Image (cartoon, rainbow, N blue to C red):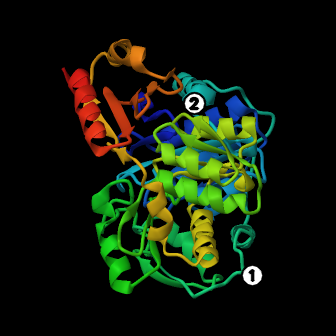
Amino acid sequence: MVDESIFKAYDIRGVYPSELDEDAAYKIGRAFVSFLKCKTVVVGQDMRKSSPSLFKALTRGINEQGADVVDIGNCDTPFFYFCTAKYESGIMVTASHNPAKYNGFKFCRAGTIPIGEDSGMKDIKKLVLKDKFPAPKRKGNVSKKDLMQEFIAHNLKFLEAKNKGKRLKIVVDTGNGMGGFTFPKVFKRIDVDVVPMYFDIDLSFPNHEANPLKLENVAELQKRVVKEKADFGVSIDGDCDRCIFIDEHGEYVSSDFTTALIARQLLKTHKKALFLYDLRSSWAVKEAIEEAGGRTKMCRVGHAFIKAQMRKMDALFAGELSGHLYFKESVWTESSIIATILMINMLREEGKRLSELVSPLQRYFASGELNSEVKDKDGKMKELVKMFKSDAKSVSYLDGIRLEFEDWWFNVRPSNTEPLLRLNLEAKSKKKMEEMRDRILAVIRR
């Protein structure tokens, strides 16, 4: 019997083999083909010890349900997305930055459109649990395809070679994750000095968790950037689809500021383009993009929602506070490699240090994301709207609640998987931020 808990909002993840095993992988392969009615599935895998065995069981299920498998071998998430865009569907065997005991699957349909809770995951789950599949007319087969050179060329298209400026030094920490597979292949073709940190792939993550959102995971990188007198550092997560930048002083650059900087860089060649930013982002993001001639639209949190909105609105780029950075020219998917290349272009062209580019964006005072355990999440959000709406300039229900005022705003949104409410708040003064942060937290936690 397959453990239902492995089916998450955006992917499948579980402890191997107690929660997720080969039997589940086989059934998931059959269910995926039955749901999509696809003829071909791209399948790649990260380098966890359990990945080859799960890959074998998964592909057996796909073949026995009548679809062919295109085996792209080891991959990180951006490489997987690049390969999947050439076919009608794809599955990656990965558990991202989760510890080595975990594994899982990430799904895409045609056009690299992700399959999540509201776009097919529930249907696949039902098929797996029912465990009754229609007999196919034929069995599929497995063929291998090496698309790495095409992937490298795709990334290098974003490099502005004409404006070299000074030779940059960057420190790249892939955290023993899958970024160590692709980053060296691309960056050996770029005229920069790369100081590698933890490029050896070991998905037990022996040095630190490959999650750059936690400050303890970037502490060593911050010190290394200063020691090496580097121009910037970049911390990559376990499957290489998220990144966080560190400036030359070793200071952490919030991902909403990175969104603004990359958008401004893209506006140099894409006039009046549309950019999306997630609703937890600083006011400074919208202001900076529009000051540079771009158009902006707020979006909700979560890669499936953002990618869908990007496609619908034909947005050029989107940035999420979690470090996901999405590019239309990369099939509306995330790429930490492209983000790093654009940062190189920016520093070369501007002739400024990263801290100098970030400084003008530090206009306001943010609380950071604060989590509180709450049983009645909807009830608590209704209480907050009732308390504050009379003074608000606007009230939005795009993702949880977001209320804007003359000199501050706040967003409270529920976790999809835990009994948590997440608060983000920003104000024009530190005093106002602290006052309203404490006031709202008191309401949430009472």
Query: Could you tell me residue 201's position as x and y percent?
Result: 44, 70
Q: Nearer the viewer, residue 383 or 211?
A: 383
- Identified by mark 2, the residue type is Met
> Which residue is at the front of the view, 62 or 159?
159
How far separated are the C-alphas under marks 2 and 1?
A: 45 Å
Q: Position of residue 59 (x, y in %)?
A: 63, 48
Residues 390 and 248: in front is 390
Q: Which mark is residue 121?
A: 2
Q: Is residue 224 visible?
A: yes
Q: Are marks 2 and 1 in contact (CB under 8 Å)?
A: no
Q: Which secondary structure lies at badge 1?
A: loop
Q: Residue at left 53%, top 45%?
A: 105
Circle 2: is it few (<14), some (14-19), or many (20+) Cα within 10 Å? many
Q: Residue at x 24, y 21 (%)?
A: 443
- Residue 311 lies, with reference to residue 266, above or below; the image says above
In the picture of the structure, the residue carrying the numbered disc 1 is 162
Tell me which residue sits at (69%, 60%) in the image. 266
> Residue 281, percent across and down?
48, 43
